[in-house]
Image (spheres, rainbow, N blue to C red):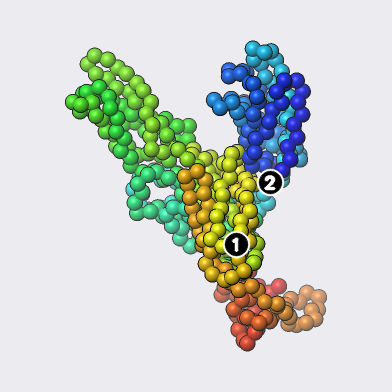
């Protein structure tokens, strides 16, 4: 993606940092670097092409602007800066891509998941573009980075997935639950990051005998408050349910002689989280297959700026992954020429998730015939024959098992389509 920068008056031209492309009508984040910008400068942003929030100046010098682009092919972002150097302005023109067509959205019926929950959570599947979700005769592929997902259930209201947490969880985490339509797994997909809480033990040193209150502090989770008393040596221990986005707690203590407060670090909210979107279970030798990873930041928000994960393959080659949408990183894996099981490992900082894909022999040359061979107007094909050297290598996609009969002969496969499945 190419970004165009047009400087009006700022002495230092803003630099647009790498990140996911902006999508029409979808929340996005513009990540800028303005060299020489003084801390405390007042920054305003506006656009005629959508909605824009107030810019945020980060301690490392970056400026981030949350936007929702309109339907045009670009977003013109006007920055006005007021600092000790005076007033300046600059316009940044950013391309906007159309919203992903056919995307799927999972809506958890409960979040976050409390510690020790055993019942699990239902997730309702909806279509992101307002169209109907996949029909009941489609096969859905599912995957979860944590816990297990039962087979999706379809009824008159659509699809429901049931996720069950692991039996034991040492630290709070985000479970990334992903789903894809098997007919178009690389393009019709969706995922949700479900926060799963865990009981945590927090130790601190304070004044001997102090009575203290610990309150978790995060914009992404409701606060939790617990009390405890320090022992005669000043050691104090708290037991509390911890949300995976909470990295800080506020400690307030009181003794007979004084009251004091301080912030303490908590064992959560320190790194992004990764989850594989469902890859195909079997691919032919030499095939090129998209590899897709869901990425959420430490606060559970989809990653839109910064580094994408890297993917290493035990066989074949993988291109460099890029953020192609909010929370979605994508690359291309070329399968090896030799059949076998291939291990794919995605890494980002200290996080790692893996999956395996089975590589089959390369697909043989196929011949396809249909019955009847001539169709009167209004008639439909009722039988489709696929002939190849290896019938076990012949695949069908998008047709639900049970709605068709498969006959395998020597070098041939015939599909007898049910009437409502006729082509």
Answer above or below: position of 289 versus 40.
below
Q: Quadrant of the N terminus?
A: top right
x, y percentage for residue 116? 34, 48
x, y percentage for residue 31? 63, 33
Answer above or below: position of 387 versus 69.
below
The secondary structure type at the circle numbered 2 is loop
x, y percentage for residue 276? 53, 54
Count neighbours of disc 1 (C-alpha within 10 A) and say few if under 14, some if 14 to 19, many if 20 or more. some
The residue drawn where x is 27% and y is 33% is 237
x, y percentage for residue 392? 59, 78
Residue assigned mark 2: 99
Image mark for residue 316: 1
Lower sequence index among marks 1 and 2: 2
The residue drawn where x is 21% and y is 23% is 209
Give whichever of 376, 354 is nearer the camera.
Answer: 354
Answer above or below: position of 395 versus 138.
below
Give whichever of 351, 297 is nearer the camera.
Answer: 351
The residue drawn where x is 65% and y is 65% is 287
Can residue 158 be seen from the camera position used here? no
Quadrant of the rendered image containing residue 197:
top left
Q: Quadrant of the C terminus?
A: bottom right
The secondary structure type at the circle numbered 1 is loop
Give whichever of 397, 322 is nearer the camera.
Answer: 322
Q: Are marks 1 and 2 in contact (CB under 8 Å)?
A: no
The residue drawn where x is 69% and y is 21% is 80
Which residue lies most toward the left here? 232
Q: Estimate the spatial distance between the alpha carbons at disc 1 and disc 2, rounded to whole Å.
A: 32 Å
Count neighbours of disc 2 (C-alpha within 10 A) and say few if under 14, some if 14 to 19, many if 20 or more. some
Please tell me how many numbered marks the rendered image carries. 2
Quadrant of the rendered image containing residue 94:
top right
């Amino acid at each position: 993606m190419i970004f165009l920068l047009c400087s009006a008056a700022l002495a230092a031209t803003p630099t647009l940092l790498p990140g996911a492309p902006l999508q029409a009508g979808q929340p996005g984040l513009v990540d800028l670097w303005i060299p020489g910008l003084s801390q405390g400068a007042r920054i305003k942003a506006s656009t005629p092409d959508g909605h824009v929030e107030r810019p945020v100046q980060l301690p490392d010098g970056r400026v981030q602007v949350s936007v929702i682009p309109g339907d045009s092919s670009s977003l013109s972002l006007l920055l006005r800066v007021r600092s000790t150097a005076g007033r300046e302005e600059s316009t940044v023109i950013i391309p906007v891509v159309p919203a992903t067509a056919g995307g799927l959205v999972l809506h958890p019926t409960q979040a976050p998941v409390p510690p020790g929950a055993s019942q699990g959570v239902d997730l309702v599947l909806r279509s992101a573009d307002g169209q109907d979700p996949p029909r009941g005769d489609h096969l859905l592929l599912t995957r979860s980075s944590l816990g297990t997902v039962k087979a999706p259930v379809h009824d008159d209201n659509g699809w429901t997935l049931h996720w069950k947490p692991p039996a034991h969880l040492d630290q709070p985490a985000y479970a990334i639950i992903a789903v894809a339509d098997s007919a178009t797994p690389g393009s019709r997909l969706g995922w949700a990051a479900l926060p799963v809480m865990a009981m945590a033990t927090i130790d601190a040193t304070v004044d001997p005998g102090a009575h203290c209150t610990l309150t978790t502090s995060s914009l992404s989770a409701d606060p939790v408050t617990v009390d405890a008393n320090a022992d005669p040596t000043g050691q104090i221990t708290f037991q509390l349910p911890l949300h995976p986005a909470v990295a800080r707690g506020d400690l307030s203590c009181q003794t007979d002689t004084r009251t004091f407060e301080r912030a303490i670090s908590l064992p959560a909210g320190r790194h992004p989280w990764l989850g594989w979107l469902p890859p195909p279970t079997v691919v032919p030798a030499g095939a090129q297959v998209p590899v897709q990873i869901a990425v959420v930041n430490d606060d559970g928000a989809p990653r839109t700026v910064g580094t994408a994960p890297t993917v290493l393959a035990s066989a074949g080659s993988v291109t460099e992954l890029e953020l192609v949408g909010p929370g979605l990183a994508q690359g291309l894996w070329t399968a090896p020429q030799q059949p076998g099981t291939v291990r794919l490992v995605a890494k980002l900082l200290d996080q790692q998730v893996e999956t395996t894909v089975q590589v089959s022999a390369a697909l043989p040359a196929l011949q396809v015939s249909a019955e009847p061979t001539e169709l009167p107007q209004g008639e439909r094909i009722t039988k489709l024959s696929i002939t190849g050297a290896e019938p076990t290598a012949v695949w069908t996609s998008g047709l639900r098992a049970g709605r068709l009969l498969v006959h395998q002969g020597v070098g041939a496969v015939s599909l007898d389509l049910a009437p409502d499945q006729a082509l």
